Amino acid sequence: MTGRRWRVVAFVLAAPAAAFALLLWAAEVRWSAPWSPATQRNLAGSAFQEVFGQGRTRGATLVVEAAADDHSTLQVAAVDIDADDFAVLRYRFAEFPRTLELSLVFRVAAAPDDVQTVSLPWPGGDDTTFDLSAVPSWKGRVIEIGFAEFATAQLVPPERGFAPFRLERASLWSDSWRGDLAALATDWFGAWPWSQRSVHALGREGDSRTRSIVVFAALATAALALLAVMLLGLRGRRATAALLACAALAWLVLDLRWQLGLQQRLAATRALYAGTPLDERNALVGDREIQQAAERVRALAEARVPPQRVLVHASSGYALLRLVWHLLPLDAAAFWLPLPSLTVPDGTLVVFYENDDWYANPAFRRFLAHSERLWDADDAIMQGSFDPVPAIVAFRYRHGP
Amino acid sequence: MAPDYLLAWLLPLAAGAGAVRLAQGRAPWQGATSAALGTGWIVGVFVAATIAGLTGREATRDAFPGAWPWLAGIAVVAWAFVAWRARTVPRARGADISAAASSSVRIAWWLLLALVMLRFGLLAWEASLRPVFPWDAWSAWAVKPKTWMLLGHAEPFIDFAAWLDGAPGHTTATWNYPELLAWIEVWFASAAGGWNEPLVDLAWCGALAAFALAAYGYWRGSGVRALPAMVLVYALVSLPLLDAHVALAGYADLWIAVTLGLAALAWSRWLVQREQAQWWLALVLAACLPAIKLEGAVWLALFAVVMVLERIPLRWRLTIVGALAFAFVGGIATGGFSMPVPGLGWVGLAWGRIAIPGMPPFELRWHAVGEATLASLFALPNWHLLWYALPALVLWRRRALRDDPAARMLGLLVLVQLLVLFVLFFFTMAAAWAQDYTSANRLVLQIVPCVFVFAAALLRGAGRQASASR
């Protein structure tokens, strides 16, 4: 064999070896760990009990047939493990709807009343592996694990999220190369829904131990180009061409991954909207409860002609601004704080949504001292009952007695 | 699909493309049609929105019926001029990916085009399914058009204090934002027959597609070969954050990005071919930036400064830059000064402080946000390998950068844009945007098309040099 051929053989062997070494680096594989996990805790689906919602066991699986009144479901199983010994979670569902979001819930012996949650990617139909070692609360003795499912936040109306599915199995693995690499695959290719963050920065939210696929792609490009120069003896324009080819390949791989993510998100969007006529899609929103509250406020405001101006205060910025959005085209505005100098035209409707500042906050109480308290046709929202906080409390503002 | 809605897409294309075609000069050039169609659609949409804003205030639901005859008129006049002028000039070449290219190049070109089309198909499908989703889209940008469409007329938006005093009008935190985008939304909503968020949001897909089309045409016209030009288009369209702004439509950043990018494209044509009309087209497009979003004024100011600098003879350039630098340093040293910035008003500059009317002053001090910034650019899956590739490309094509005045000027434009972002993120309170991965990437997104225009200038003639040397 000529020297040239030896160099080609060396490149053919070294290139995948270098890529694999980089994969191990990206997965932060512990070199001392075995290839397969030395110990596992396996839980059949039937080992889980339905806490919220309705389910029944079928063979080794748990069939979740209905959601609870709040449209969520929860299945738990008792365990007794040391978190450090079992940092890799594997789970498998069947027929899991695209409209649901999945979370791992667990409790630890040190704080048995606190339920910890970790967002998990959409499980699809295969085994999914998730690394828990970077989750700060995954430590000490774990006494219970479970899965919670609820309509994808801000995207799916709660009542449209649920469809029956099966929990087939879950397991916890000790450290292994196989587990770390599978967790890396989940980290890089897991199906996450759109979120408010998606227009600012992409990538998985939350704690992750693995390294970025973009950094991996850049290093793999540089490594392959370097090997081409060293082993194949490429120089000048041929070396540049090799670098360009490697970069193009890396870009393409990154883009195919992104395209896969787009297709998964599109599938979730289609699951919700595809059967809805175009002119009805405006109304099909993830915050259906805020939308319904807006309709009640609108009825109050439009009870007078012309419709009254509305000031909205709410428990969160999201709820406040969404309520204003749903109230449009009413003349509604966000009301953050009642400054002492603030005066409002008499007759303005002041609305509190899921918020008790109207009696708990002295500044608001002073501001509303002479205002007339209103409630809509549904008396249940008022009647002076402060617990639970009524969804909507409304006042007609009056500056003085 | 309603014919009106289809017309709302086609009329801006016809009117804008006709006007842009007139600005392309008499002699046809490779890619001119593609450039005219892409640029023309954006220009046409801006014109449609402006006419809708002028004629449709009292009856927003009739904004489309009121404005379309004007657009049709512009289209007829523009294309009549184009046809009259075309009598005396030879026809443009037809096929872009010519038979002279090797079969592998042609296959790669078509494959990339298929990938681009597939991407636009996915994005349009997603956008056409859902109502407005991202935060600022419904809390800021769509508040006015939704209110106007549902009311049936365009009520003014006023500040909160005036609203509390009982002044007529609606209020919102973003009451003073520019309204061009709002009228674009009214234009499409009116044509769709009412406030229909999925149909309004499809315009974002149109904006990116129009830029891609225009960019391909301009790059071909500037001497980039067919395959590298298509590679650049694919690379741009593949960028995840750009795609996210199309799929989850509603933010203004994409419109800033494509408008600034189109201005850079037209200006690059001037730099290479010295077509005066392209210089003016670049200026007109850049002048639209403050009408889209407030920071558009900053991009306009920077763009205008670099454009003017380029027009100054080389022998005077250093003298004038030196004099301006001296005046700037002197002004700061003597307690600061103010300068007018279109769209922002009189901007005050002093040591450690920038004051923009209507905004809290920017106190300048160092913020250690390097890690978050680097993560955004190099580690998070926002930009694929763009920010690795850019310095590598500059290094590789350093001779083109040294010898080609067009590449140098476009490089200067990108450099000052990056410098402004550097100062903004590392020296002002905007550092928080970088730290929490929010607005920082959206500001980077606004200059990404310009980065591609610069990259194309560097690649111009790259293949030919290689061929010649073989």
Image (cartoon, rainbow, N blue to C red):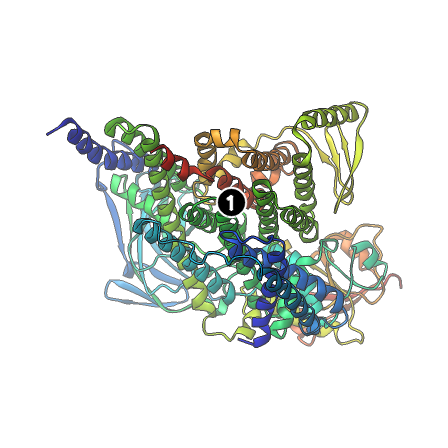
Q: Residue furthest right?
A: A401
Residue at (80%, 50%) from the top-left corner? Answer: A339
Instruction: Tell me the chain of label 1.
Output: B
Number of numbered discs on residues = 1
In which image quadrant can residue B8 be found? bottom right
Q: Secondary structure at mark 1?
A: loop
Q: Residue at x 64, y 56 (%)?
A: A315
Residue B403 in view (yes/no): yes
Quadrant of image for the C terminus of chain B: top left
Q: Residue B114: image x %, image y %?
A: 38, 58
In the image: residue B463, left or right of residue A378? left
Image coords of residue A206 (percent x, y): 46, 45
The answer to which of B426 and B54 lies nearer the viewer is B54
| Residue at far left of view | A1
For badge 1, the amino acid type reads: Ser
| Of the pair B286 and B458, the residue shown nearer to us | B458
Q: Is residue B249 above or below residue A245?
A: below
Name the residue located 85 percent from the left edge and 63 percent from the top edge. A345
The spot of residue B93 in percent (x, y) is 46, 56
Residue assigned mark 1? B222
Q: Is residue A138 left or right of residue B27?
A: left
In this image, B111 relative to A399: left or right? left
Categorize mark 1 by other alpha carbons within 10 Å: few (<14), some (14-19), many (20+).
Answer: many
